[in-house]
């Protein structure tokens, strides 16, 4: 099956060019093919922009164990609608993804029910009483983009705060590592000081700038000494952005839409709906994140999509869970930002497509180029639509951006050459594939 997409302005990380794109089967056969090229299907995309599909390298889809919030199918439907063609999912499910058996179970489930491409991290786990670290599992896993460490605890009970355990993970494993960086000691001290508070604004005082800075500095130090590839997840503070000026070449960093578009001022309007880990920060922190994205200190944007039901989120603080759903709207939020002059379309392609493919060595992903996978999204920059809870495909059924009008929306998504989203509908029968890696063999 050959599909010719004609008339679209194609967005590359180095510029925008109007050119036809020919797809054959799951791949991109040619850019600017001859006018005589045969095609079974011709799509006139005049007036629209074509981007590589978004690669979201940080999502929580809750299967197995907490499927009432989300499962791999509903999470992938939300991805397809949002222009996300590949997701990499985190290990804090029930059971946790801390063994090869649990990883393979997730891969089997995903192959059955995901409409977009998928990969799953291996979680590091450490039992402080028995001093047990799952090092063998971390050393021998291959079907994974990398290792996730919760250096500070968040949703679930994965935590590796012990220095010896961290040293061993960085010294003895081969896979790239990423981490949730909020210092556990600082968070616990702050929480003890504010123990009787039911004011959600204290969430940002408990999980404060220092907590983020201390843990990020600790992780970068480990990465530097062990020369181990490391990705800082969800940078949220100006202090971390400053620290990234002096990072080794093999350290990369990421920001999330909720830290780019919300501040502590939003607690008043949204309360626990903007409770997340790391917490929302000040307008000065938000400015620093944008600056770090623009000058390349932060190279990736990912969502940290963390679905909880609205009823769960509305439980009074501090019993309310942390996290917000976002895969469905992340690209639209960034296109809207571009429409307001905050960034350019090539920057969006760099942050949301090319850089995550590079950081995780994803084979044939992240670019509109010959021989690459036909994971693509067509966007209409003139389309203005309002995010509505009732229209969300995530099972959690809500968005912290409910009621917000955005300019610029995905209108069609291809995964491995097949249309999975068009005319407002996702094809629930579509099938994504397990990601492959372009890296030296691990074992
Ligand atoms: O707010 C968050 N929620 N941050 C995380 O790191 C985990 C996530 C979740 O899984 O709910």
Image (cartoon, helix red, strand yellow):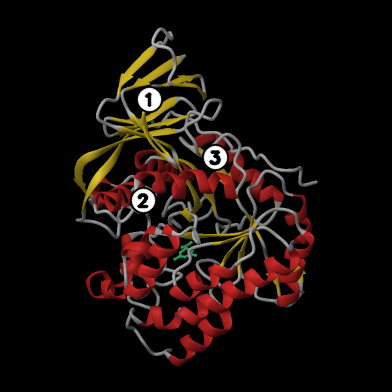
Rendered view: 299 above or below 430: below
Disc with the residue nearer the chain's start (2 vs 3) = 3
The residue beneath circle 1 is 19
Give the label on residue 110, or none: 3
- Indicate which label's residue lies in the foreground, 1 or 2: 1
Residue 237 seen in the figure: yes
- Indicate which label's residue lies in the foreground, 2 or 3: 2
Q: Residue at x 52, y 88 (%)?
A: 189
Report the Cα–Cα distance between label 2 and label 3: 22 Å
Would residue 266 appear left or right of 139 to someone viewing this image?
left
Would residue 293 appear left or right of 272 to someone viewing this image?
right
Rendered view: 11 above or below 316: above
Report the Cα–Cα distance between label 1 and label 3: 34 Å
Q: Residue at x 24, y 30 (%)?
A: 47
Q: Residues within 10 Å of mark 2 (few under 14, many from 20)?
A: many
The residue beneath circle 2 is 330
Q: Residues within 10 Å of mark 1 (few under 14, many from 20)?
A: some
Q: Residue furthest bottom?
A: 193
Disc with the residue nearer the chain's start (1 vs 3) = 1
Q: Position of residue 150 (x, y in %)?
A: 59, 67
Residue 133 seen in the figure: no
Rendered view: 426 above or below 245: above
Disc with the residue nearer the chain's start (1 vs 2) = 1
């Amino acid at each position: 099956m050959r599909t010719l997409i004609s008339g679209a302005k194609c967005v590359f990380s180095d510029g925008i060019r109007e050119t036809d794109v020919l797809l054959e089967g799951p791949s991109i056969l040619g850019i600017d093919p001859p006018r005589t090229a045969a095609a079974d299907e011709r799509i006139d995309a005049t007036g629209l922009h074509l981007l590589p599909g978004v690669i979201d390298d940080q999502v929580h889809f809750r299967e197995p164990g907490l499927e009432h919030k989300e499962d791999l199918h509903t999470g992938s439907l939300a991805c397809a609608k949002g222009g996300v063609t590949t997701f990499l999912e985190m290990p804090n499910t029930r059971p946790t993804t801390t063994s090869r058996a649990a990883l393979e179970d997730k891969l089997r489930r995903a192959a059955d029910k995901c409409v977009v491409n998928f990969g799953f991290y291996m979680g590091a786990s450490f039992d402080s009483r028995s001093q047990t670290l799952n090092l063998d599992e971390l050393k021998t896993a291959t079907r994974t983009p990398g290792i996730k460490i919760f250096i500070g605890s968040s949703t679930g009970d994965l935590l590796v705060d012990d220095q010896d355990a961290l040293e061993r993970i960085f010294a003895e494993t081969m896979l790239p590592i990423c981490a949730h960086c909020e210092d556990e000691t600082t968070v616990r001290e702050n929480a003890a000081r504010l123990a009787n508070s039911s004011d959600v604004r204290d969430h940002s005082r408990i999980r404060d700038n220092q907590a983020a800075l201390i843990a990020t500095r600790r992780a970068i130090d480990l990465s530097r000494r062990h020369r181990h590839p490391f990705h800082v997840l969800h940078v949220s503070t100006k202090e971390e952005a400053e620290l990234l000026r002096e990072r080794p070449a093999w350290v990369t960093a990421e920001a999330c839409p909720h830290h780019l578009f919300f501040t502590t001022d939003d607690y008043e309007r949204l309360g626990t709906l903007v409770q997340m880990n790391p917490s929302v920060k000040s307008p000065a922190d938000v400015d620093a994140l944008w600056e770090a994205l623009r000058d390349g200190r932060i190279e990736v944007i990912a969502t940290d999509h963390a679905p909880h039901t609205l009823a769960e989120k509305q439980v009074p603080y501090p019993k309310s869970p942390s996290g917000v759903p976002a895969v469905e709207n992340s690209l639209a939020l960034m296109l809207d930002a571009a429409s307001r002059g905050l960034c350019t379309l090539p920057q969006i392609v760099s942050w949301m497509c090319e850089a995550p493919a590079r950081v995780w060595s994803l084979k044939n992903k992240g670019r509109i180029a010959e021989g690459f996978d036909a994971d693509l999204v067509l966007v209409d920059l003139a389309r203005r639509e309002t995010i509505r809870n009732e229209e969300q495909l995530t099972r959690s059924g809500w968005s912290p951006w409910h009621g917000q009008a955005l300019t610029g929306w995905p209108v069609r998504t291809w995964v491995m050459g097949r249309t999975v989203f068009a005319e407002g509908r996702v094809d629930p029968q579509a099938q994504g594939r397990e990601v492959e890696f372009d890296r030296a063999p691990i074992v």
